[in-house]
Amino acid sequence: MKLDNNFKERKSLGQDVFDYLKNAIIDQTIEPGSRLVESKIADMLGISRTPLREALHKLEREDWIEKTPSGGFQVVTLTKDDIEQTFGVRSVLEAYAARLAAENHTNKDLLPLEKKIKEFKICLELKKDGDKLQKINTQFHDLLYALSKNPKLIKMINQLRAQISRFRQIILKQSEYAYKSNEDHIKMLDAIKNRDGEAVEKLVRAHIIKGKNAVLSQLKQEEEEKRA
């Protein structure tokens, strides 16, 4: 685990440390199952224990980390149940948002989505890093669900944002899936253009199931490697 040390004491330090550690967990700079040793993290970041503990307790409340029998903390390891539950909720919320987008959009609304599809394709062809792909992918989905014009629904989707980002980080490392993902986005956009809410709802559900299967496949592979 290698972390930056450019933190300084300030009023919002606890939140800053929380955001930093959460992002490190999402991109797996801090890997699942890793122990978090307060003294080492505080030294690496150049901060006192107080804001660090504030951050750790918030991470625990949001299920990013858990207490160990020895009293410290470790990063929560993704389980099959976690994956099934998160993707199950996603499939319901995001498919409904896509249906609303098909019903409520204007032609002008779709231009940013077309732009993101092109950016993603170029990024794939140039073999850019996964972080760039994930950023474009997230922007596409955010733009799509914003077209639902349903603030309560968007808020519910955004509450899953961090967990979804963690899964996308895993999914888009698989180049075959990344290409299929962009193909799915093109089909979604075509259905929205045709104002076919039923079709885009089915496409989004299928898209999310593909993502779930990709994550489960990666999890199984990692478990087999540990046993080998």
Image (tube, rainbow, N blue to C red):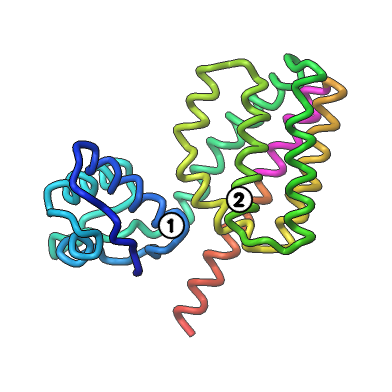
Task: Give the dominant element type of the magenta stretch: helix, strand or loop.
Answer: helix
Q: Nearer the viewer, residue 212 or 49?
A: 49
Instruction: Specify whether 128 is left or right of 61.
Output: right
Q: Classify mark 1: helix, strand or loop.
A: loop
| Location of residue 185 in the rendering, given as x and y in whole percent from the top left corner | 76, 41
User: Mark number for residue 9?
Assistant: none
Q: Secondary structure at mark 2?
A: helix
Any mark on residue 134, and which?
Answer: 2
Mark positioned earlier in the residue sequence (1 or 2):
1
The correct choice, above or below, for 59 with respect to 169 in the image is above
Residue 178 included in the magenta stretch of the image: no
Which residue is rendered at x = 60% and y = 41% of the image? Answer: 138
x then y, percent, for residue 214 = 63, 58
Where the N terminus falls, by quadrant? bottom left
Q: Is residue 166 above or below residue 202?
A: below
Q: Residues within 10 Å of mark 2 (few under 14, many from 20)?
A: many
Above or below for 166 versus 30: above
Answer left or right for 177 relative to 92: right
Compare residues 149 and 39 and report the one nearer the observer: 39
- Residue pushed farthest bottom? 228
Label placed on residue 78: 1
Residue name at image x 72 percent, y 64 percent: 127
The amino acid type of the residue labelled 2 equals Gln
Q: Quadrant of residue 201?
A: top right
Q: Residue 2: x and y, percent?
A: 35, 68
Q: Amino acid at mark 1?
A: Leu
The spot of residue 36 in percent (x, y) is: 24, 62
Q: Relative to the observer, which residue lies in front, 22 or 2?
A: 2
Q: Residue at x 39, y 56 (%)?
A: 25
Q: Which residues are magenta?
A: 196-208
The residues bearing labels 1 and 2 have C-alpha atoms spaced at a distance of 19 Å
Residue depicted at 37% across the width and 63% down the height:
30
